[in-house]
Image (tube, rainbow, N blue to C red):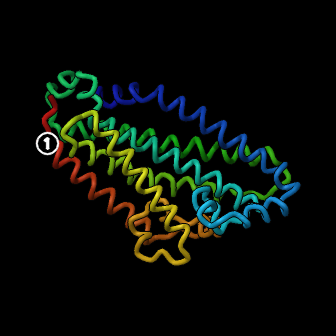
């Protein structure tokens, strides 16, 4: 329990800064919808005139920016990017923080196995990811409430938050695995960041294609399609795939961490 509390304290300051950023992103973004909606038709025409690669990079492929749900989907795309970056930081930090800071003797000399220590540290990471998603969803609901005249999209916002949590969980596990595999502690976060970059590029490629097919399986950014979430559909197949991949990466992380040279 002391390890868990220590991890929560260590992650509190970064979490506060992330929440300030998410508050600004969500509130400013959604409140601007009212002004955008005034000239919505011209804006929609402009968006559809963009080359598909530009739409893919901006996360606006197949999204109707004239509707509040579609506009929220675009904001959620940027929230997802932020959540994945944060998840990479959480997963890698759980594995290598003590080695990078040269404080590993503080934890790993305690009467607890390496597996238990890593499990507690990762549990703290998931707590922060969950809070990230909950607070972001609350910010979105509050910001939409300020619009007053628009429909209630709370259910859609919650589905977006759930999709962000699942994809973020996958990247916590992936970055923990890559950090455990890295020979040098300072490379752990770098490899996780590269995994994020590759996944983002794959997501853009998938969005550029009319039918990405099997490519979608290796692109977590496209596991949950905004149009489905807006329609109230949550893909159970990709939910299972995300959970299975997270479990596999976690298993590999624990297996490798038992033998890792912490010095």
In the image, taking residue 58 as reference, residue 206 lies left or right, namely left
Q: 244 above or below 139?
A: below
Task: Classify residue 166 by image quadrant.
Answer: bottom left
Residue at 32% across, 63% down: 244
Residue at 17% across, 37% down: 114
Q: Position of residue 158 (x, y in %)?
A: 59, 55
Q: 208 above or below 109?
A: below
Kind of element beneath mark 1? loop
Q: Position of residue 186 (x, y in %)?
A: 28, 33
Image quarter in which the C terminus is found: top left
Q: Position of residue 110 (x, y in %)?
A: 16, 26
Image quarter in which the N terminus is found: top left
Residue at 77% across, 44% down: 31
In the image, taking residue 257 as reference, residue 51 lies left or right, namely right
Q: 8 above or below 198?
A: above
Q: Residues within 10 Å of mark 1 (few under 14, many from 20)?
A: some
Q: Position of residue 226 (x, y in %)?
A: 60, 64
* Residue that protrudes farthest toward the front in the picture: 51
Residue at 42% across, 57% down: 199
Task: Classify residue 121 by image quadrant.
Answer: top left
Residue matched to label 1: 258
In the image, taking residue 19 as reference, residue 253 lies left or right, namely left
Figure label count:
1
């Amino acid at each position: 329990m002391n390890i868990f509390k220590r991890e929560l304290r260590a992650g509190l300051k970064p979490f506060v800064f992330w929440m300030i950023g998410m508050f600004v992103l969500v509130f400013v973004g959604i409140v601007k919808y009212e002004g955008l909606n005034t000239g919505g038709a011209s804006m929609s025409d402009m968006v559809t005139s963009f080359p598909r690669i530009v739409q893919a990079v901006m996360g606006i492929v197949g999204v109707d920016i004239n509707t509040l749900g579609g506009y929220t989907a675009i904001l959620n795309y940027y929230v997802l990017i932020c959540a994945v970056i944060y998840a990479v930081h959480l997963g890698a930090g759980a594995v290598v923080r003590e080695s990078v800071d040269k404080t590993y003797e503080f934890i790993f000399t305690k009467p607890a196995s390496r597996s238990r220590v890593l499990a507690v540290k990762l549990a703290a990471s998931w707590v922060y990811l969950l809070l990230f998603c909950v607070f972001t969803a609350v910010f979105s609901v509050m910001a939409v409430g300020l619009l007053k005249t628009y429909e209630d999209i709370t259910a859609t916002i919650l589905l977006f938050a759930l999709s962000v949590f699942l994809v973020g969980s996958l990247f916590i596990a992936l970055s923990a695995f890559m950090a455990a595999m890295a020979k040098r502690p300072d490379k752990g976060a770098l490899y996780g960041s590269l995994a994020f970059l590759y996944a983002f590029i794959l997501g853009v490629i998938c969005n550029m294609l009319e039918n990405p097919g099997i490519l979608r399986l290796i692109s977590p950014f496209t596991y949950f399609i905004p149009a489905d979430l807006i329609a109230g559909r949550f893909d159970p197949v990709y939910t299972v795939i995300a959970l299975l991949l997270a479990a596999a990466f976690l298993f590999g992380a624990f297996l490798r961490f038992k033998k890792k040279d912490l010095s």
